[in-house]
Amino acid sequence: MVTAALSVATIALICQFALALPAETQAADALVDFFPVANGGGSMLDKSGGLGEPLNVIISAKSSSTVLTKSGLTLFAQAIGFSTECLGLHLGDPQTANLGDGNGDVNEMGVWRADFGNVAVGTCLESLQGGNHFRAWTQNGSSANSGALFLAANRLTQTQDLSQHHTIIPNGYNIGRDELVAAAVGTHKHPILPLSFTTTSTSLTGLLAAGTQGVNHNISQDGIVKLLTVTTKISF
C-alpha cells in the first residue's frame, strides 16, 4: 500500500538521485559548511507571530549536493523517521527566516513531521499524538550562497482532539533538536528506495544566544546548534 501510494513521487525522486549520484558516496565541493547569518544581518531565530523559533540544526553545505534540495531533504527525512505533511496540507501561515544571504526574510521551504514508521500517511498521526517536526530554509542568496540548510526543530505536545492546537513542550526546542540529531546520526536506509544516508554531527556554540529572549512560547533553549554532514549513495 505504501509503495503504491508513493509510486509517482518516489519514481521521480529516485530517477533524479540515480542521475546525480555515483555508486559511491558523493560529497559536495563546498569550501564552507555555512556562512554565519549574523554577518549578513540575519538571525538564528525565524519569525512567527512577532517572535521566533531557534534555527538549531544546520545541514552542512559539504553534504552530498543532492541532499541540499527540497526533494533530497525529503528522502533524507524519510530515512530517519520524518516525512512531508499529512496529505500535503499545511495549516497556518509559513514561518520566515533571514539567513543573512541577501535574500531577506523568506518563507520556509517546507515542514517535515514524525511519520511513526509510515512515510505515506504517518504524519497524519501527529495531529493526535504530537511529536517532532522541523522546518527548513536554504542559504542561497547572492551575498552568502553556501547552499546549507538551516532547520528549526522542536517537539509538540499531544492533543486530545482536532479542535485543539499543539504547543511546544517544556524544553521542546532542545528536545526536538536532540531527537532529530539522534535519529540522523549513523547510516540509515530509505524505507522504500535503494538509498542510504550517513550522517555525522558536531555541536556549535556562539551562533545562537541561549535563553528565552525573542523565542516563541517563552521556552528557554541552550543555544547549541548541531551541524550535520550528510552523505548519500545508491544502496541496494
Image (cartoon, rainbow, N blue to C red):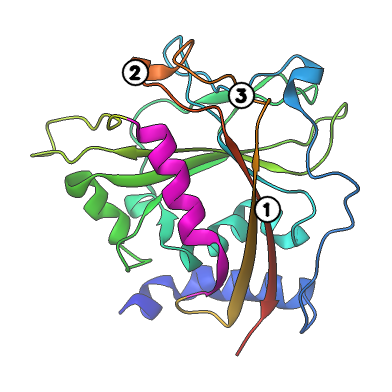
Label 3 vs label 2, nearer the camera? 3
Q: Residue at x 48, y 19 (%)?
A: 52
Where is the N terminus found, in terms of image quarters?
bottom left
Where is the C terminus found, in terms of image quarters?
bottom right
Label 1 vs label 3, nearer the camera? 3
Q: Where residue 190 sits: x, y (%)? A: 51, 74
* 153, above or below 31, in the image: above
Q: Residue at x 79, y 45 (%)?
A: 33
The reply to whether dot 2 and dot 1 touch (C-beta < 8 Å) is no
The residue type indicated by label 1 comes to Thr
Q: Where residue 149 sits: x, y (%)? A: 67, 43
Q: Nearer the viewer, residue 133 or 175?
A: 175
Assess whether residue 37 is covered by the magenta stretch.
Answer: no
Name the residue carrying label 3: 208
Q: Residue at x 34, y 31 (%)?
A: 171
Q: Where residue 28 sits: x, y (%)? A: 83, 59
Q: Residue furthest bottom?
A: 236
Label 2 vs label 1, nearer the camera? 2
Tell me if mark 2 has few (under 14), some (14-19) or many (20+) residues whose alpha carbon lies within 10 angstroms of its own: some
The earlier-in-sequence mark between 2 and 1 is 1
Name the residue carrying label 1: 69
